[in-house]
Image (cartoon, grey):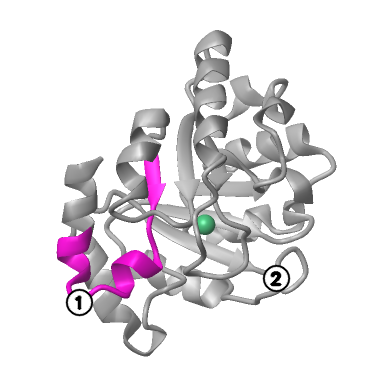
Amino acid sequence: MLSANFGQLDREIDMINRSKADWFHLDVMDGLFVPNISFGMPIIQHIASKAIKPLDVHLMIVQPERYLKEFQQVGSNILTVHYEAVTHLHRCIQEIKSLGMKAGVSLNPHSPVHLLESILPELDLVLIMSVNPGFGGQKFIPHTLKKIEALREMIAASGSKALIEVDGGVDQQTAPLLVEAGADVLVAGSYVFGSPNPEATIQMLKELA
Ligand code: ZN
C-alpha cells in the first residue's frame, strides 16, 4: 500500500479487494530505522475497516515491541518486525502470537538467513528484503535468490512452517525467479500501482508465480 494513491485510498482498497491479491501489505516507517516516515495507526485502522483480506503489516521501526498491542487493535493480522530492530526477538515473537496475530521476522539485505536459525520454529513468516528498505521503487538485489534458497533448506530441516515472503523489486522479471528459489509470498508495490491497470498487473504476477 506504500505505493498507493492516498488521495483516493478507498478506491485503491477496493481494487485490492477485487484483485487476485491475497493480502494487503502495509509498510510502516518511523524515520529512524529507515529514512522515510510512511503512515501509522489511523491509516491502518481505515484500511482494516474496508479490507476483506488479511492485513500483512511490516514494521520498519526501531523497538517495535513498544507498539504490538496497538498494531493488533487497529486490525493487523500478520505482524512482521525486523531482526535488526529488536533486542529480545524471542519475547517479541511470543507476544505477537499471544495477541492472536501471525508473527514474522524480516531481514535487511546485509543480514544472513542463518541469524534466524534459533527462532525459525517460532515463526509464521520470514520476510526477505530484496532492496534496502525505506523507499518504494528500488532495484532488486540479485543475491536475494541465494538467501531464499538457503532459507528454504533451513525451513525444511527445522520442520518450521514459516512462509518465505519477499519485499522489494518484484516485477515480471524477478517474480518467476523468486518463486523458483522458494518464495511463497511476493510483495509488489510500485510495479502494481505504477502500472496502467493495477488489477491486471496483479493477475499477471499471480499467473507468473
Ligand atoms: Zn514491506
On screen, residue 99 above or below 155: below
Which of 91/1 is in front? 1
Q: Position of residue 177 (x, y in %)?
A: 36, 38
Instruction: Specify the quadrant of the image occupied by residue 89.
Output: top right
Amino acid type assigned to the residue bearing label 2 in the image = Asp
Helix, strand or loop for disc 2: loop
The image quadrant where one finds the N terminus is bottom left
On screen, residue 142 above or below 7: above
Dot label at residue 20: none
Which of 111/124 is in front? 111
Please give the range of residues in magenta: 185-201
Q: Position of residue 140 (x, y in %)?
A: 49, 54
Marks 1/2: CA distance? 30 Å
Instruction: Specify the quadrant of the image occupied by residue 193.
Output: bottom left
Mark 1, other Cα within 10 Å: few <14 / some 14–19 / many ≥20: few
Q: Is residue 65 left or right of residue 191?
A: right
Mark 2, other Cα within 10 Å: few <14 / some 14–19 / many ≥20: some
Q: Is residue 90 visible?
A: yes
Helix, strand or loop for disc 1: loop
The residue pinned by badge 1 equals 196
The residue pinned by badge 2 equals 30
**Residue 200 is a magenta residue:** yes
The image quadrant where one finds the C terminus is top left
Which of 190/72 is in front? 190
